[in-house]
């Protein structure tokens, strides 16, 4: 049985990737960090019904020694580095933490691997946010980067240190430049889930309004289930490389909001409030990915449309809230 180690297993992508790898016959280990309330963040793994089938190991991306202990104990064939402070807006409030975890944390995992298990295959969760102020209309692996937030600057470090370890030490280290991907397991601070949760609350009479910032921003949104498959495909290649993973379509936040309200049978005008406090110090106005290389070399294509995904998310939030308030 191949052995996989996932950092960020308690997050959206980590949970879907764990499910995907278990279905492929992997033994799966995941990094989990202690919190003072005692509980680990296990709700996503429970929601997917995979908690009993994985092994959780305690550690932190900022703690090299814990990563070295885990790599030595687990002896993984594949390592997926998904852990990060991943919310762009928070990165202006906690820039040092974001640099240490989202940036230098990548170096910690790579160092633990280089010193103990350099033949293991490594995946780095890079981001379309690195394109920021876009330099090409459609962003591909050759588009120059222009990060617009402390988060994106940290991700850029993670991307280049991955490339550097591949070139310096011959490690099988790949960087997936993934565009936004969502699901019913998306954190509630991100705009799609904030919208689907907000719409569900209005529908159930639990809220009257939904407050958003810049609804003119455009994103290339896919589904997390499709995107974790691309991560695995990268590590099955003979040679490590970098890949853009995207749908090749871009939509405004406003369009996504319209889908969610329409699905719930509600009027946007009656409930949406634009709040200047939710605008960002520097915005990424538009992202549009070119997934041609992933399609050609990996044979990857997305299967779930934005509309299907947003409707699935609204339905899941209505069901969750109905159960909670029963
Ligand atoms: P989430 O925010 O849902 O999950 C982040 C994970 O990182 C959680 O498991 C969290 O643990 C963990 N984590 C945070 N800080 C630490 C730390 N110091 N030590 C150990 N673990 C830590 O992110 P997603 O699943 O959405 O994204 C996965 C990765 O992909 C991230 O690196 C993100 O930046 C990147 N990415 C995401 C995209 C998207 O659209 N979703 C697009 C492009 C890149 P805990 O549960 O304890 O908080
Ligand atoms: P993003 O995702 O910053 O692209 O990063 P997010 O969903 O937070 O924002 C998308 C766009 O929506 C606009 N927006 C709002 N965003 C939030 N969160 N809340 C609001 O109320 C709101 N109103 C408008 C934002 O300004 C932005 O333009 C995500 C994360 O998953 C990163 O980790 C990942 O790297 C990138 O996607 C690719």
Image (spheres, helix red, strand yellow):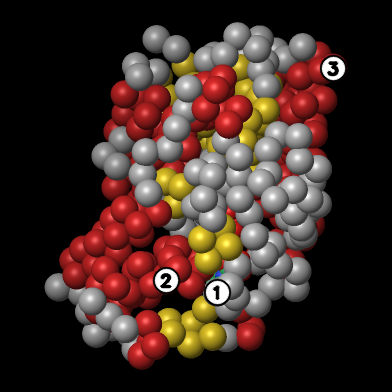
Is there CB contact under 8 Å for labels 1 and 2?
yes
Label 2 neighbourhood size at 10 Å, few (<14), some (14-19), many (20+)?
A: many
> Would residue 104 appear left or right of 10 to someone viewing this image?
right
Disc 3/disc 1 C-alpha distance (Å): 43 Å
The picture places residue 17, in percent across and down from the top left corner, at 43, 33
Distance from mark 1 CB to nearest ligand 2 atom below 8 Å: yes
Task: Please say if 296 is above or below 87.
Answer: above
Label 1 neighbourhood size at 10 Å, few (<14), some (14-19), many (20+)?
A: some
Mark 3 lies on residue: 168
Front in this rendered view, residue 175 or 12: 175
Q: Earlier in the sequence, mark 1 or mark 2?
A: 1
User: Which quarter of the picture shows residue 322?
Assistant: bottom left
The picture places residue 89, in percent across and down from the top left corner, at 65, 66
Of helix, strand and loop, which one carries label 1? loop
Mark 2 lies on residue: 257
Picture disc at residue 265: none
Residue at the image position 46 percent from the left and 58 percent from the top? 187
Front in this rendered view, residue 258 or 326: 258
Task: Please say if 98 is above or below 318.
Answer: above
Disc 2/disc 3 C-alpha distance (Å): 46 Å
The picture places residue 8, in percent across and down from the top left corner, at 53, 41
């Amino acid at each position: 049985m191949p052995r996989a180690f996932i950092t960020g297993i308690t997050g959206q992508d980590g949970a879907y990737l764990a499910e995907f790898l278990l279905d492929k016959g992997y033994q799966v280990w995941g990094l989990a960090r202690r919190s003072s309330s005692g509980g680990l963040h296990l709700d996503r793994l429970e929601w997917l019904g995979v908690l009993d089938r994985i092994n959780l190991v305690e550690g932190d991306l900022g703690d090299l020694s814990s990563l070295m202990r885990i790599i030595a104990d687990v002896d993984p064939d594949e390592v997926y580095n998904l852990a990060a402070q991943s919310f762009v807006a928070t990165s202006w409030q906690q820039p040092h933490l974001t640099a240490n975890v989202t940036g230098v944390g990548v170096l910690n995992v790579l160092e633990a691997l280089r010193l103990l298990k350099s033949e293991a295959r490594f995946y780095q969760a890079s981001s379309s946010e690195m394109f920021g102020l876009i330099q090409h209309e459609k962003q591909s692996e050759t588009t120059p980067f222009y990060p617009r937030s402390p988060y994106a600057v940290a991700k850029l470090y993670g991307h280049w240190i991955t490339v550097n370890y591949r070139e310096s030490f011959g490690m099988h280290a790949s960087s997936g430049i993934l565009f936004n991907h969502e699901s019913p397991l998306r954190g509630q601070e991100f705009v799609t889930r904030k919208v689907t949760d907000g719409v569900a609350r209005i529908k159930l009479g639990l809220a009257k309004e939904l407050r958003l910032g810049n609804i003119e921003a455009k994103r290339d949104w896919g589904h997390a289930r499709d995107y974790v498959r691309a991560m695995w495909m990268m590590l099955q290649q003979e040679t490590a490389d970098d890949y853009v993973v995207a749908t090749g379509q871009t939509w405004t936040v406003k369009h996504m909001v319209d889908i969610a309200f329409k699905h719930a049978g509600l009027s946007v005008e009656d409930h949406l409030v634009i709040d200047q406090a939710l605008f960002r110090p520097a915005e990424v106005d538009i992202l549009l990915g070119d997934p041609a290389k992933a399609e050609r070399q990996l044979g990857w294509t997305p299967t779930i449309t934005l509309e299907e995904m947003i409707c699935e998310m609204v339905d899941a939030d209505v069901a969750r809230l109905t159960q909670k308030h029963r």
